[in-house]
Image (tube, rainbow, N blue to C red):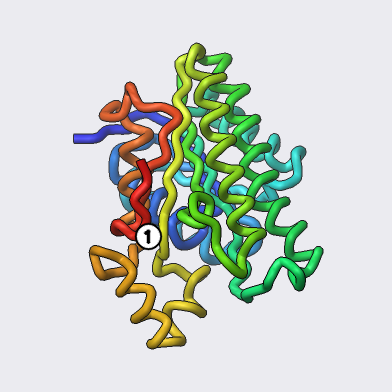
Amino acid sequence: MVSFKDQIILITGASRGVGAAVAMKFAEAGAKGVIINYHVNWEAAAKTAAEVERMGAEAVIVQSDISVPEQAHHLVRQALDRYGRLDVVVANAGIWPPADHLVTELPDEQWEDTIRININGVYYICREGARVMVGQRSGNIITVSSTAGQRGEAGHSDYAASKGAVISFTKSLATELGPHNVRVNCVAPGWIDTDMAADALRSDEEMLRRITDAIPLRRVATADDVAGPILFLASELARHVTGEILNVNGGAILCG
């Protein structure tokens, strides 16, 4: 059985979707404390925290915009001030602007927001987590990319670029931090049935059929389908795995 007994877990974007599912998985696996980061939706974060505590872990809710260096630092300090250590960081927070835009029409504001949140946010929280883990000579960092970061995505060049950067960043961190006994891995999901993809998946039956037909397993992932692989990568079962990109897409993109 996978166990995170006595471990302290920090998850960005943990109020809903994959982040919330990950928080509950770690609580179920025996984590001592789960830091639930959110940016806007306090009510959703509180609901996640209640479920985490129902499963026996302590939940700490922290509001912060991790694309701002000082706020990323503050988030990690909350874990250290309360527990004195940090065992796992899951860099999950991100955005997917649903409107299609050719690069010739992509608004500057959208490009800048996507890069700021999806790259800068991952960078700052991983940097802060790494500083702690290098000092304690142990830890796990899990980033969240996307199939779009591997193959590109027409109409979403901003998102694809940001998620491709996360993959390269993960591999760089793995080589840097490995000698300090810190592992860094990444999950790359395809379509996930969460609020972020709701407009595409729940409002257009024809689009949902096309998406499903392109997935060999013939279904769209749930948040739990992604949370499980994140738990695996952070566990002792994967103790000799670092710098890997674990595809969680039902076979839609087969990458070696």
> Which residue lies most toward the right here?
108
Residue pointed to by mark 1? 223
The amino acid pointed to by label 1 is Ala
Is residue 81 left or right of 71 when viewed as pictured?
Answer: left
Up-down relation of residue 40 to residue 19 (above or below) = below
The quadrant where residue 56 appears:
top left
User: Picture coordinates of residue 219 (x, y %)?
Assistant: 28, 69
- Within 10 Å of disc 1 (Cα), the crowding (few <14, some 14-19, many 20+) is many
Pick the front one: 112 or 198: 112
Pick the front one: 222 or 245: 245
Pick the front one: 53 or 93: 93
> What residue is drawn where x is 34% and y is 51%?
254
Up-down relation of residue 111 to residue 164 (above or below) = below
> What residue is drawn where x is 60% and y is 34%?
126
User: Picture coordinates of residue 224 (x, y %)?
Assistant: 33, 57
Q: Provide the secondary structure element on which disc 1 rests.
A: helix
> What residue is drawn where x is 66% and y is 59%?
158
The quadrant where residue 166 appears:
top right
Up-down relation of residue 240 to residue 251 (above or below) = above
User: Picture coordinates of residue 222 (x, y %)?
Assistant: 34, 63
